[in-house]
Amino acid sequence: SLIEYLKAASPEFINFRYKSMGILTNKIEEYGKSPKYIMEFNFCIGFFLRQHIQSLPDEDTYILIDYDIDRISNLKKDLETNYKHKQFIFLCCDIDEIPIANSSIDIIIDYWMTKDYGQSDNKFLLDIVLPLLKHNGLLAGVYPYIRPNSKGYNNMPLELKDYFNKEKILKKIEDL
């Protein structure tokens, strides 16, 4: 829960996460094309949206994807109760089975999900979702990395190291 997260996380880490959400919001506003279809991938569904929703133009459609129907239902109720924006699409599905046509999304928001998806499914998320992005669309993401010479990196299973290596993440994004 959010309360458990706030108790467990350091203030520095929380500030880091909120600062990164501010940077993503600025990049989305700079993109400037409207109306937009925005798709968020986030292990904690709606986490970024709740910070960005005040900047979300009324005509933009925001798509949220999660495999857990309860999380989607709870988020839907929260959005209906507490926010005026009404252009949402909620999809309950696995990421590799998203029922959306290729080249139909203007903005993809990947807030740490590449890391979480890599750890859970041992696949690179962007291989799956970038075909959904329109030509000249915007990929807005936050990708945690661990320095290759750090203890955390050295103790990590070999198959996960690419998901936390800054140079490999950047190379993979450039290649895509």
Image (spheres, grey):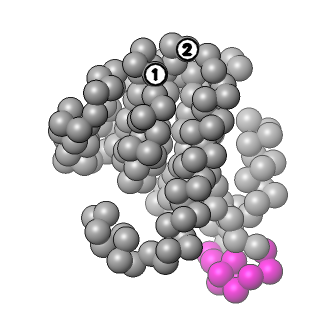
Characterize the local packing of mark 2: few (<14), some (14-19) or many (20 or more) Cα atoms within 10 angstroms: few
Which is in the foreground here, disc 2 or disc 1?
A: 1
Percent across and percent down for residue 98 are 42, 31
Quadrant of the snapshot with the N terminus: bottom left
Residue at horizontal 52 percent and vertical 56 percent from the top: 18
* Magenta-colored span: 148-157
Residue 34 is tagged as 2
Residue at horizontal 32 percent and vertical 26 percent from the top: 85
Q: In this view, does 44 lie to the left or right of 29?
A: left
The answer to whether residue 168 is seen in the rendering is yes
Quadrant of the snapshot with the C terminus: top right
Q: Do the residues labelled 2 and 1 touch (CB within 8 Å)?
A: yes
**Residue closest to the eye, 115 or 89:** 89
Characterize the local packing of mark 1: few (<14), some (14-19) or many (20 or more) Cα atoms within 10 angstroms: some
**Residue closest to the eye, 172 or 33:** 33
The answer to whether 53 is drawn above or below residue 22 in the figure is above
Q: In this view, does 116 lie to the left or right of 160?
A: left
* Secondary element at tag 1: loop
Residue at horizontal 54 percent and vertical 60 percent from the top: 17
Disc 2 residue type (three-letter): Ser
Residue 150: in magenta span:
yes
Residue 57 is tagged as 1
Percent across and percent down for residue 108 are 56, 33
Residue 46 is tagged as none
